[in-house]
């Protein structure tokens, strides 16, 4: 019998090792795919005991529709993660599920923005879907990372979103975000606010560590958002047409402009709290730049919305992912559960 030379034997062993590694990788991929499929099937078939009733039906974003709340329903069952609506006067009533799934959602002026996940065998991809008042898709944009925030201008013309392109939490310092603005009328896409010229105290900011997130629109040309650089966060006021922005004040994250345009709800980092849970829900008076805390003392990692000029709505972790709470904006009263198993609400009209 002919013996292999040491070099040939080494080559044969190397090929066997490569083949074995490929088999292991393929097995892992197959295992992950099977696990993901089983997990999705389990979620779809599992029914939430005692949860809100959910049934399929039409959901409209039309400005002339009866006042309603549209949100991502997180009730276990066949309609989990679908956009659902309830009458604003009956937030715990039966939900009408649209069949459209979103991770993040917002709507105004007859336009909706739905940030979706496309599940893969190993990796997920993400996209932004612009919806008309009947929830028909009018535009699709691929996203660079995990969706986290979404907003629409009052007229419905402008939409914005934020994604994580590095990291998956605002709590630490090791993350990177990308905020984008889309003009649904012209189709013009500003893929990142990092292209904006931002001034602070009259000087242009030149920094490699800038991050933007949490756009809230004033109108179709002006907005507020959060800028982070140098270990600090700033509220900025931006202009779409000129691609410029100026800082307003520090320590403002995920701003949300009140319907009357006089105040901003935001999450504020409070010294002494846990690094993983550092935020309290505050309200800023834009005329004086003074802020005050709301009666919500739990950690709020969300971009709150205003249900009216006096009331804030926001999410907190719940048994099935997230619950919606409400609290007065003036600092009085106490927080109350609005509806369980829900996320990313919009009040319409």
Image: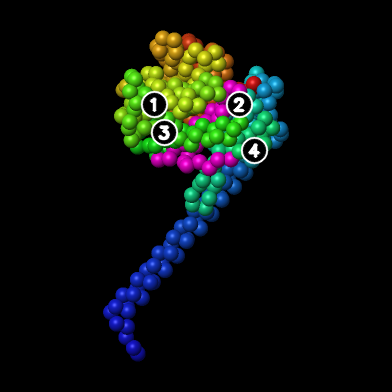
Q: Residues within 10 Å of mark 4 (few under 14, many from 20)?
A: some
Count of numbered circles in the view? 4
* Magenta segment boundaries in residue numbering: 140-166
Majority secondary structure in the magenta region: strand
Q: For residue 104, say whether it is visible.
A: no
The quadrant in which the N terminus is found is bottom left
> Looking at this view, is 303 or 84 the one in front?
303
Residue shown at the point (57%, 18%) measured from the top left: 307
The residue pinned by badge 3 equals: 194
Q: The residue tagged with tag 3: helix, strand or loop?
A: helix
Q: Which residue is mark 1?
A: 198
| CA gap, disc 2 and disc 1 | 26 Å
Dot 1 crowding, Cα within 10 Å, few <14, some 14–19, many 20+: many
Q: CA distance from mark 1 to mark 4?
A: 33 Å
What label does residue 156 carry, if any?
2
Horizontal side of residue 202 vs 54, given as left or right: left
Q: What kind of element bears circle 2?
A: loop
Q: Considering only order in the chain, which callout, 3 or 4, is on the residue closer to the N terminus?
A: 4
Identify the residue shown where x is 68% and y is 26%. Answer: 62
Percent x, y of residue 29? 48, 57
């Amino acid at each position: 019998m002919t013996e292999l030379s040491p070099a040939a034997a080494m080559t044969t062993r190397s090929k066997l090792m490569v083949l074995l590694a490929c088999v292991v990788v393929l097995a892992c991929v197959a295992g992950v795919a099977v696990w993901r499929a089983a997990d999705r099937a389990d979620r779809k078939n599992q029914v939430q005991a005692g949860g809100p009733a959910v049934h399929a039906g039409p959901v409209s974003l039309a400005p002339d529709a009866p006042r309603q709340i549209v949100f991502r329903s997180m009730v276990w069952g066949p309609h989990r993660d679908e956009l659902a609506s309830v009458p604003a006067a009956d937030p715990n009533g039966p939900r009408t599920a649209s069949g459209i799934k979103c991770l993040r959602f917002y709507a105004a002026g007859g336009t909706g923005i739905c940030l979706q996940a496309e599940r893969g065998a190993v990796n997920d991809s993400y996209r932004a879907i612009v919806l008309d008042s009947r929830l028909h898709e009018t535009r699709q944009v691929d996203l660079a990372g995990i969706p986290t925030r979404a907003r629409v201008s009052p007229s419905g013309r402008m939409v914005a979103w934020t994604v994580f392109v590095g990291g998956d939490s605002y709590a630490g310092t090791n993350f990177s975000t990308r905020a984008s603005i889309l003009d649904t009328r012209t189709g013009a896409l500003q893929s990142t606010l990092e292209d904006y010229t931002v001034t602070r105290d009259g000087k242009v900011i030149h920094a490699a560590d800038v991050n933007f997130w949490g756009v809230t629109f004033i109108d179709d040309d002006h907005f507020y958002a959060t800028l982070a650089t140098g270990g600090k966060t700033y509220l900025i006021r931006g202009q779409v047409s000129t691609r410029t922005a100026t800082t307003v004040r520090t320590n403002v994250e995920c701003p949300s402009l009140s319907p009357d345009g006089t105040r901003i709800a935001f999450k504020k980092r409070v010294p002494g709290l846990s690094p993983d849970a550092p935020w309290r829900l505050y309200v800023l008076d834009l005329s004086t730049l003074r802020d005050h805390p709301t009666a919500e003392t739990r950690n709020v990692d969300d971009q709150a919305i205003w249900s009216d000029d006096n009331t804030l709505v926001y999410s907190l972790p719940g048994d099935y992912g997230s619950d919606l709470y409400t609290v007065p904006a003036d600092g009085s009263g106490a927080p109350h559960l609005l509806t369980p198993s829900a996320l990313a609400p919009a009040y319409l009209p």
